Protein backbone atom coordinates (compact mmCIF):
# COMPACT_ATOMS: atom_id res chain seq x y z
CA UNK A 1 0.00 0.00 0.00
CA UNK A 2 1.44 3.41 -0.91
CA UNK A 3 1.63 6.29 1.55
CA UNK A 4 -1.69 8.05 2.04
CA UNK A 5 -3.71 5.13 0.69
CA UNK A 6 -6.10 3.88 3.34
CA UNK A 7 -7.28 0.61 1.78
CA UNK A 8 -6.26 -1.49 -1.22
CA UNK A 9 -8.28 -0.07 -4.14
CA UNK A 10 -10.14 -3.21 -5.16
CA UNK A 11 -13.53 -1.45 -5.34
CA UNK A 12 -14.17 1.50 -7.62
CA UNK A 13 -17.01 3.96 -7.50
CA UNK A 14 -17.44 6.46 -10.28
CA UNK A 15 -19.12 9.64 -9.04
CA UNK A 16 -20.83 11.83 -11.63
CA UNK A 17 -21.33 15.33 -10.25
CA UNK A 18 -23.67 17.73 -12.02
CA UNK A 19 -24.42 21.40 -11.43
CA UNK A 20 -26.84 21.47 -8.50
CA UNK A 21 -26.56 23.43 -5.32
CA UNK A 22 -26.36 20.19 -3.27
CA UNK A 23 -22.87 19.74 -4.72
CA UNK A 24 -21.38 20.66 -1.34
CA UNK A 25 -22.85 17.41 0.04
CA UNK A 26 -21.19 15.51 -2.85
CA UNK A 27 -17.78 16.66 -1.53
CA UNK A 28 -18.54 15.01 1.81
CA UNK A 29 -19.87 11.90 0.05
CA UNK A 30 -16.65 11.53 -1.96
CA UNK A 31 -14.64 12.01 1.24
CA UNK A 32 -16.59 9.15 2.88
CA UNK A 33 -15.98 6.94 -0.18
CA UNK A 34 -12.24 7.56 0.06
CA UNK A 35 -12.24 6.89 3.79
CA UNK A 36 -14.06 3.57 3.35
CA UNK A 37 -11.77 2.40 0.52
CA UNK A 38 -14.11 2.74 -2.46
CA UNK A 39 -11.45 4.38 -4.68
CA UNK A 40 -13.69 7.12 -6.07
CA UNK A 41 -13.20 8.69 -9.48
CA UNK A 42 -15.10 11.93 -9.96
CA UNK A 43 -16.43 13.18 -13.27
CA UNK A 44 -17.89 16.67 -13.36
CA UNK A 45 -20.14 18.46 -15.81
CA UNK A 46 -19.26 21.96 -17.00
CA UNK A 47 -21.97 23.40 -14.72
CA UNK A 48 -20.60 21.49 -11.71
CA UNK A 49 -17.23 23.18 -12.19
CA UNK A 50 -18.91 26.56 -11.83
CA UNK A 51 -20.03 25.60 -8.32
CA UNK A 52 -16.98 23.79 -6.93
CA UNK A 53 -13.39 23.75 -8.20
CA UNK A 54 -12.41 20.25 -9.42
CA UNK A 55 -9.39 20.55 -7.14
CA UNK A 56 -11.71 20.10 -4.14
CA UNK A 57 -12.90 16.74 -5.47
CA UNK A 58 -9.38 15.73 -6.50
CA UNK A 59 -8.14 16.42 -2.96
CA UNK A 60 -10.87 14.42 -1.19
CA UNK A 61 -10.77 11.58 -3.77
CA UNK A 62 -6.95 11.60 -3.86
CA UNK A 63 -7.26 11.15 -7.63
CA UNK A 64 -7.58 13.29 -10.72
CA UNK A 65 -11.01 14.55 -11.78
CA UNK A 66 -12.39 13.76 -15.24
CA UNK A 67 -14.19 16.39 -17.26
CA UNK A 68 -15.15 17.27 -20.81
CA UNK A 69 -12.15 19.50 -21.37
CA UNK A 70 -9.72 16.67 -20.56
CA UNK A 71 -11.39 14.35 -23.07
CA UNK A 72 -11.15 16.89 -25.90
CA UNK A 73 -7.40 17.52 -25.56
CA UNK A 74 -5.29 16.33 -28.51
CA UNK A 75 -2.69 15.13 -26.01
CA UNK A 76 -4.77 12.21 -24.68
CA UNK A 77 -7.80 11.11 -22.65
CA UNK A 78 -10.05 10.58 -25.70
CA UNK A 79 -11.47 7.27 -24.59
CA UNK A 80 -11.87 8.28 -21.00
CA UNK A 81 -15.63 7.60 -21.16
CA UNK A 82 -15.04 3.96 -22.10
CA UNK A 83 -12.09 3.45 -19.78
CA UNK A 84 -13.76 5.07 -16.76
CA UNK A 85 -16.85 2.92 -17.34
CA UNK A 86 -14.70 -0.20 -17.57
CA UNK A 87 -12.80 0.55 -14.34
CA UNK A 88 -15.84 1.27 -12.16
CA UNK A 89 -17.94 -1.30 -10.25
CA UNK A 90 -20.70 1.13 -9.27
CA UNK A 91 -21.71 4.53 -10.67
CA UNK A 92 -23.32 7.27 -8.56
CA UNK A 93 -24.72 10.56 -9.89
CA UNK A 94 -24.93 13.06 -7.02
CA UNK A 95 -26.23 15.64 -7.25
CA UNK A 96 -28.28 14.66 -10.29
CA UNK A 97 -29.77 17.85 -11.73
CA UNK A 98 -33.09 17.79 -13.57
CA UNK A 99 -31.05 18.39 -16.73
CA UNK A 100 -28.70 15.45 -16.16
CA UNK A 101 -31.60 13.18 -15.13
CA UNK A 102 -33.28 14.04 -18.45
CA UNK A 103 -30.11 13.23 -20.39
CA UNK A 104 -29.63 9.89 -18.65
CA UNK A 105 -33.29 8.95 -19.10
CA UNK A 106 -33.23 9.64 -22.84
CA UNK A 107 -29.76 8.42 -23.71
CA UNK A 108 -28.19 11.76 -24.59
CA UNK A 109 -24.40 11.62 -24.49
CA UNK A 110 -23.27 15.17 -25.10
CA UNK A 111 -20.90 15.38 -22.13
CA UNK A 112 -18.47 13.02 -20.42
CA UNK A 113 -20.83 12.15 -17.53
CA UNK A 114 -23.75 11.13 -19.75
CA UNK A 115 -21.44 9.31 -22.20
CA UNK A 116 -19.95 7.30 -19.32
CA UNK A 117 -23.47 6.41 -18.14
CA UNK A 118 -24.22 4.88 -21.55
CA UNK A 119 -20.94 3.00 -21.59
CA UNK A 120 -21.32 1.67 -18.03
CA UNK A 121 -22.89 -1.76 -17.34
CA UNK A 122 -22.96 -2.01 -13.51
CA UNK A 123 -25.35 -0.72 -10.84
CA UNK A 124 -26.20 3.00 -11.06
CA UNK A 125 -27.39 5.15 -8.17
CA UNK A 126 -28.96 8.54 -8.83
CA UNK A 127 -29.45 11.14 -6.07
CA UNK A 128 -31.74 13.82 -7.53
CA UNK A 129 -31.52 17.39 -6.30
CA UNK A 130 -33.67 20.27 -7.45
CA UNK A 131 -35.97 23.06 -6.43
CA UNK A 132 -39.35 21.50 -5.54
CA UNK A 133 -41.10 22.80 -8.66
CA UNK A 134 -38.35 21.47 -10.94
CA UNK A 135 -38.35 18.15 -9.05
CA UNK A 136 -42.12 17.72 -9.09
CA UNK A 137 -42.50 18.76 -12.73
CA UNK A 138 -44.05 15.95 -14.72
CA UNK A 139 -41.06 15.89 -17.06
CA UNK A 140 -38.63 15.26 -14.19
CA UNK A 141 -40.87 12.71 -12.50
CA UNK A 142 -41.34 10.79 -15.78
CA UNK A 143 -37.58 10.84 -16.36
CA UNK A 144 -36.94 9.47 -12.87
CA UNK A 145 -39.53 6.75 -13.50
CA UNK A 146 -37.76 5.83 -16.72
CA UNK A 147 -34.48 5.49 -14.83
CA UNK A 148 -36.06 3.46 -12.00
CA UNK A 149 -37.77 1.22 -14.56
CA UNK A 150 -34.36 0.56 -16.06
CA UNK A 151 -33.07 -0.67 -12.69
CA UNK A 152 -31.35 2.54 -11.63
CA UNK A 153 -31.50 3.04 -7.85
CA UNK A 154 -33.22 6.45 -7.69
CA UNK A 155 -32.82 7.69 -4.12
CA UNK A 156 -35.72 9.47 -2.44
CA UNK A 157 -35.35 13.19 -1.90
CA UNK A 158 -36.05 14.82 1.43
CA UNK A 159 -38.73 17.39 2.15
CA UNK A 160 -37.76 20.60 3.91
CA UNK A 161 -35.89 23.88 3.46
CA UNK A 162 -34.27 24.11 0.04
CA UNK A 163 -31.21 26.16 -0.82
CA UNK A 164 -33.38 28.41 -3.03
CA UNK A 165 -35.15 29.63 0.11
CA UNK A 166 -38.34 27.71 -0.63
CA UNK A 167 -39.66 24.63 1.11
CA UNK A 168 -40.67 21.33 -0.44
CA UNK A 169 -39.47 18.08 -1.98
CA UNK A 170 -36.23 17.83 -3.94
CA UNK A 171 -33.59 18.00 -1.23
CA UNK A 172 -30.76 15.60 -2.08
CA UNK A 173 -30.27 12.50 0.12
CA UNK A 174 -27.58 12.90 2.77
CA UNK A 175 -24.02 11.62 2.15
CA UNK A 176 -24.71 8.80 4.67
CA UNK A 177 -27.82 7.65 2.76
CA UNK A 178 -25.91 7.67 -0.54
CA UNK A 179 -23.11 5.69 1.17
CA UNK A 180 -25.69 3.12 2.29
CA UNK A 181 -26.87 2.84 -1.33
CA UNK A 182 -23.27 2.20 -2.43
CA UNK A 183 -22.79 -0.54 0.19
CA UNK A 184 -26.07 -2.06 -0.92
CA UNK A 185 -24.97 -2.00 -4.57
CA UNK A 186 -21.80 -3.92 -3.67
CA UNK A 187 -23.85 -6.40 -1.58
CA UNK A 188 -26.19 -6.78 -4.55
CA UNK A 189 -23.19 -7.68 -6.72
CA UNK A 190 -22.41 -10.41 -4.14
CA UNK A 191 -26.06 -11.65 -4.42
CA UNK A 192 -27.41 -13.14 -1.17
CA UNK A 193 -30.89 -14.66 -0.83
CA UNK A 194 -32.46 -11.28 -0.02
CA UNK A 195 -31.00 -9.46 -3.05
CA UNK A 196 -33.79 -8.27 -5.32
CA UNK A 197 -36.54 -9.63 -3.03
CA UNK A 198 -39.27 -7.39 -1.61
CA UNK A 199 -39.26 -7.24 2.19
CA UNK A 200 -41.79 -5.33 4.28
CA UNK A 201 -40.70 -4.27 7.76
CA UNK A 202 -42.87 -2.58 10.37
CA UNK A 203 -41.45 -0.34 13.08
CA UNK A 204 -42.48 1.94 15.92
CA UNK A 205 -45.41 2.02 18.27
CA UNK A 206 -48.94 2.65 17.03
CA UNK A 207 -51.09 5.46 18.45
CA UNK A 208 -54.78 4.91 19.06
CA UNK A 209 -56.75 8.13 19.12
CA UNK A 210 -58.85 9.13 22.14
CA UNK A 211 -59.79 12.53 20.71
CA UNK A 212 -58.30 15.03 18.26
CA UNK A 213 -55.16 15.54 20.37
CA UNK A 214 -54.79 12.58 22.74
CA UNK A 215 -53.87 9.00 22.07
CA UNK A 216 -52.93 5.72 23.75
CA UNK A 217 -49.43 4.73 22.74
CA UNK A 218 -46.43 2.70 23.84
CA UNK A 219 -42.71 3.25 24.37
CA UNK A 220 -41.43 1.61 21.18
CA UNK A 221 -38.66 3.69 19.57
CA UNK A 222 -38.79 1.89 16.22
CA UNK A 223 -35.04 1.21 16.40
CA UNK A 224 -35.24 -2.58 16.01
CA UNK A 225 -37.44 -2.40 12.92
CA UNK A 226 -35.27 0.34 11.47
CA UNK A 227 -32.14 -1.78 12.02
CA UNK A 228 -33.77 -4.73 10.23
CA UNK A 229 -34.87 -2.52 7.32
CA UNK A 230 -31.42 -0.91 7.01
CA UNK A 231 -29.67 -4.27 7.04
CA UNK A 232 -32.09 -5.76 4.49
CA UNK A 233 -31.46 -2.74 2.28
CA UNK A 234 -27.70 -3.32 2.51
CA UNK A 235 -28.28 -6.92 1.41
CA UNK A 236 -29.88 -5.68 -1.79
CA UNK A 237 -33.54 -6.22 -0.83
CA UNK A 238 -36.36 -4.05 -2.13
CA UNK A 239 -37.33 -2.63 1.29
CA UNK A 240 -40.57 -0.98 2.37
CA UNK A 241 -40.58 0.31 5.95
CA UNK A 242 -44.04 0.80 7.43
CA UNK A 243 -43.42 3.02 10.42
CA UNK A 244 -45.08 5.31 12.90
CA UNK A 245 -41.98 7.54 12.87
CA UNK A 246 -42.21 10.23 10.20
CA UNK A 247 -38.88 12.01 10.70
CA UNK A 248 -36.32 9.31 9.89
CA UNK A 249 -34.48 9.62 6.57
CA UNK A 250 -34.18 6.32 4.71
CA UNK A 251 -32.61 5.23 1.44
CA UNK A 252 -35.66 3.09 0.70
CA UNK A 253 -39.43 3.55 0.58
CA UNK A 254 -41.19 4.46 3.80
CA UNK A 255 -44.92 4.41 4.53
CA UNK A 256 -45.86 6.47 7.58
CA UNK A 257 -48.91 5.30 9.55
CA UNK A 258 -50.34 6.09 12.96
CA UNK A 259 -52.88 3.55 14.21
CA UNK A 260 -53.02 -0.26 14.22
CA UNK A 261 -55.79 -0.10 11.59
CA UNK A 262 -53.65 2.06 9.27
CA UNK A 263 -50.71 -0.26 9.80
CA UNK A 264 -52.90 -3.30 8.99
CA UNK A 265 -54.03 -1.68 5.71
CA UNK A 266 -50.46 -0.78 4.73
CA UNK A 267 -49.15 -4.26 5.60
CA UNK A 268 -51.94 -5.96 3.60
CA UNK A 269 -51.24 -3.73 0.58
CA UNK A 270 -47.44 -3.91 0.67
CA UNK A 271 -47.03 -7.57 1.58
CA UNK A 272 -49.29 -8.78 -1.26
CA UNK A 273 -46.27 -9.03 -3.60
CA UNK A 274 -43.51 -9.37 -0.96
CA UNK A 275 -41.31 -12.36 -0.17
CA UNK A 276 -40.67 -11.47 3.49
CA UNK A 277 -42.64 -9.65 6.19
CA UNK A 278 -40.96 -8.64 9.46
CA UNK A 279 -43.41 -7.32 12.05
CA UNK A 280 -41.13 -5.48 14.48
CA UNK A 281 -43.64 -2.73 15.31
CA UNK A 282 -45.29 -2.57 18.71
CA UNK A 283 -48.92 -2.65 17.62
CA UNK A 284 -51.56 -1.72 20.17
CA UNK A 285 -53.73 -4.63 21.26
CA UNK A 286 -56.64 -2.35 22.14
CA UNK A 287 -58.03 0.96 20.92
CA UNK A 288 -60.71 3.28 22.30
CA UNK A 289 -64.09 2.24 20.96
CA UNK A 290 -65.20 5.86 20.57
CA UNK A 291 -62.98 8.65 19.25
CA UNK A 292 -64.15 12.16 20.17
CA UNK A 293 -63.92 14.54 17.23
CA UNK A 294 -62.89 17.59 19.22
CA UNK A 295 -60.89 17.82 22.44
CA UNK A 296 -62.36 16.24 25.57
CA UNK A 297 -62.84 18.96 28.18
CA UNK A 298 -61.49 18.31 31.68
CA UNK A 299 -64.24 20.42 33.18
CA UNK A 300 -67.00 18.47 31.42
CA UNK A 301 -66.81 15.40 33.68
CA UNK A 302 -65.15 14.55 37.02
CA UNK A 303 -64.03 11.15 35.68
CA UNK A 304 -63.43 9.67 32.27
CA UNK A 305 -63.99 6.02 31.39
CA UNK A 306 -62.55 4.70 28.16
CA UNK A 307 -63.96 1.52 26.70
CA UNK A 308 -61.24 -0.34 24.79
CA UNK A 309 -61.86 -2.87 22.05
CA UNK A 310 -59.31 -5.21 20.39
CA UNK A 311 -57.39 -4.00 17.32
CA UNK A 312 -56.90 -6.15 14.23
CA UNK A 313 -54.48 -9.08 14.49
CA UNK A 314 -52.13 -7.97 11.70
CA UNK A 315 -49.74 -10.91 11.83
CA UNK A 316 -52.59 -13.42 11.92
CA UNK A 317 -54.08 -11.92 8.73
CA UNK A 318 -50.96 -12.11 6.59
CA UNK A 319 -50.54 -15.87 6.26
CA UNK A 320 -50.04 -16.98 2.68
CA UNK A 321 -47.83 -19.39 0.75
CA UNK A 322 -44.62 -17.78 -0.51
CA UNK A 323 -44.44 -15.15 2.25
CA UNK A 324 -41.83 -15.72 4.96
CA UNK A 325 -43.31 -14.12 8.10
CA UNK A 326 -41.32 -12.96 11.10
CA UNK A 327 -43.01 -11.98 14.36
CA UNK A 328 -41.65 -10.46 17.56
CA UNK A 329 -42.63 -11.43 21.10
CA UNK A 330 -41.62 -8.87 23.71
CA UNK A 331 -42.34 -10.61 26.99
CA UNK A 332 -42.08 -9.27 30.54
CA UNK A 333 -39.71 -11.86 31.99
CA UNK A 334 -37.79 -14.89 30.66
CA UNK A 335 -40.95 -16.40 29.16
CA UNK A 336 -39.64 -18.18 26.08
CA UNK A 337 -42.49 -20.68 26.58
CA UNK A 338 -44.93 -17.90 25.68
CA UNK A 339 -42.85 -17.07 22.59
CA UNK A 340 -42.99 -20.72 21.48
CA UNK A 341 -46.76 -20.69 21.95
CA UNK A 342 -47.09 -17.43 19.97
CA UNK A 343 -44.99 -18.87 17.13
CA UNK A 344 -47.35 -21.83 16.87
CA UNK A 345 -50.52 -19.74 17.25
CA UNK A 346 -49.56 -17.19 14.58
CA UNK A 347 -48.04 -19.80 12.26
CA UNK A 348 -44.99 -17.58 11.62
CA UNK A 349 -41.79 -18.96 10.11
CA UNK A 350 -39.56 -17.13 12.60
CA UNK A 351 -40.30 -15.59 15.97
CA UNK A 352 -37.93 -13.24 17.79
CA UNK A 353 -38.20 -13.37 21.56
CA UNK A 354 -36.88 -10.74 23.93
CA UNK A 355 -37.34 -10.04 27.61
CA UNK A 356 -38.25 -6.38 28.03
CA UNK A 357 -37.51 -6.48 31.76
CA UNK A 358 -33.84 -7.38 31.26
CA UNK A 359 -31.65 -4.35 32.13
CA UNK A 360 -30.29 -2.13 29.33
CA UNK A 361 -32.00 -3.83 26.40
CA UNK A 362 -35.22 -3.77 24.48
CA UNK A 363 -37.64 -0.87 24.17
CA UNK A 364 -35.93 2.47 23.47
CA UNK A 365 -32.42 1.06 23.90
CA UNK A 366 -29.75 0.75 21.16
CA UNK A 367 -29.08 -2.80 22.30
CA UNK A 368 -31.07 -5.99 22.52
CA UNK A 369 -30.71 -9.62 23.54
CA UNK A 370 -32.85 -11.97 21.51
CA UNK A 371 -33.63 -15.60 20.86
CA UNK A 372 -34.57 -16.40 17.27
CA UNK A 373 -36.99 -19.30 16.96
CA UNK A 374 -36.72 -20.71 13.44
CA UNK A 375 -38.22 -23.85 11.86
CA UNK A 376 -34.91 -25.61 12.54
CA UNK A 377 -33.56 -24.21 15.82
CA UNK A 378 -33.55 -21.64 18.60
CA UNK A 379 -30.56 -19.29 18.22
CA UNK A 380 -29.66 -17.11 21.19
CA UNK A 381 -28.03 -13.72 20.44
CA UNK A 382 -26.42 -12.36 23.63
CA UNK A 383 -26.72 -8.64 24.39
CA UNK A 384 -25.42 -6.65 21.42
CA UNK A 385 -26.38 -3.75 19.14
CA UNK A 386 -29.76 -3.83 17.42
CA UNK A 387 -27.81 -3.76 14.11
CA UNK A 388 -26.03 -7.01 15.07
CA UNK A 389 -29.39 -8.52 16.13
CA UNK A 390 -30.83 -7.51 12.74
CA UNK A 391 -27.91 -9.22 10.96
CA UNK A 392 -28.42 -12.43 12.95
CA UNK A 393 -32.15 -12.35 12.19
CA UNK A 394 -31.68 -11.76 8.45
CA UNK A 395 -29.12 -14.59 8.30
CA UNK A 396 -31.92 -16.85 9.58
CA UNK A 397 -34.41 -15.34 7.10
CA UNK A 398 -31.95 -16.06 4.26
CA UNK A 399 -31.62 -19.65 5.49
CA UNK A 400 -35.42 -20.05 5.37
CA UNK A 401 -35.54 -18.44 1.91
CA UNK A 402 -32.98 -20.92 0.58
CA UNK A 403 -34.91 -23.83 2.05
CA UNK A 404 -32.49 -24.43 4.94
C1 LIG B 1 -27.28 28.72 -8.09
C2 LIG B 1 -27.85 27.62 -8.96
C3 LIG B 1 -28.32 26.48 -8.35
C4 LIG B 1 -28.87 25.46 -9.11
N1 LIG B 1 -29.31 24.33 -8.48
C5 LIG B 1 -29.88 23.35 -9.22
C6 LIG B 1 -30.35 22.19 -8.58
O1 LIG B 1 -30.24 21.99 -7.37
N2 LIG B 1 -30.94 21.25 -9.35
C7 LIG B 1 -31.09 21.38 -10.70
O2 LIG B 1 -31.65 20.49 -11.33
N3 LIG B 1 -30.59 22.46 -11.32
C8 LIG B 1 -30.00 23.45 -10.63
N4 LIG B 1 -29.52 24.55 -11.27
C9 LIG B 1 -29.58 24.63 -12.74
C10 LIG B 1 -28.48 23.78 -13.39
O3 LIG B 1 -27.21 24.22 -12.94
C11 LIG B 1 -28.58 23.89 -14.89
O4 LIG B 1 -29.78 23.25 -15.32
C12 LIG B 1 -27.38 23.28 -15.61
O5 LIG B 1 -27.57 23.39 -17.00
C13 LIG B 1 -27.20 21.83 -15.24
O6 LIG B 1 -26.17 21.26 -16.02
P1 LIG B 1 -25.60 19.80 -15.77
O7 LIG B 1 -26.79 18.90 -15.55
O8 LIG B 1 -24.85 19.45 -17.02
O9 LIG B 1 -24.69 19.87 -14.60
C14 LIG B 1 -28.95 25.59 -10.53
C15 LIG B 1 -28.43 26.75 -11.12
C16 LIG B 1 -27.89 27.74 -10.36
C17 LIG B 1 -27.35 28.95 -11.04
Image (cartoon, grey):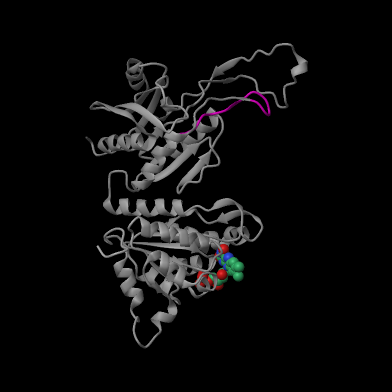
Q: Is residue 327 above or below residue 114?
A: above
Q: Position of residue 370 (x, y in %)?
A: 34, 27
User: Which SS does the magenta portion mostly show?
Assistant: loop
Query: Which residue sits at x=44%, y=67%?
Result: 57
Query: Which residue sits at x=60%, y=60%?
Result: 131
Q: Position of residue 97 (x, y in %)?
A: 52, 65
Q: Quadrant of residue 113?
A: bottom left
Q: Position of residue 290 (x, y in %)?
A: 65, 20
Describe residue 247's horizontal placement relative to residue 125 as left or right. Answer: right
The reply to whether residue 11 is in sight is: yes
Residue 348, magenta (yes or no): no
The magenta stretch is: 203-214
Q: Position of residue 246 (x, y in %)?
A: 55, 40
Query: Which residue sits at x=35%, y=52%?
Result: 183
Q: Residue furthest front?
A: 3
Q: Quadrant of ligand 1?
A: bottom right
Query: Which residue sits at x=33%, y=62%?
Result: 39
Amino acid sequence: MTAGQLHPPQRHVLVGVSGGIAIYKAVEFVRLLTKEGYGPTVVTTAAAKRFVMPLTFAAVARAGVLDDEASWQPSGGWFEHIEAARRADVMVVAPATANTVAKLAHGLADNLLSAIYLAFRGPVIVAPSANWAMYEHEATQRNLEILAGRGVDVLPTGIGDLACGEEGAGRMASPEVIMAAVRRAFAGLAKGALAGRKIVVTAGGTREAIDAVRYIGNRSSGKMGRAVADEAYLRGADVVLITTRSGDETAYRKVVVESAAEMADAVARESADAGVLVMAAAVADYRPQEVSEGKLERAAAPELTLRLVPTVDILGQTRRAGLVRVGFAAEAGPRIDRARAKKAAKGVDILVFNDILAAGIGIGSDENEITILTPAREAHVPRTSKTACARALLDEVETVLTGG
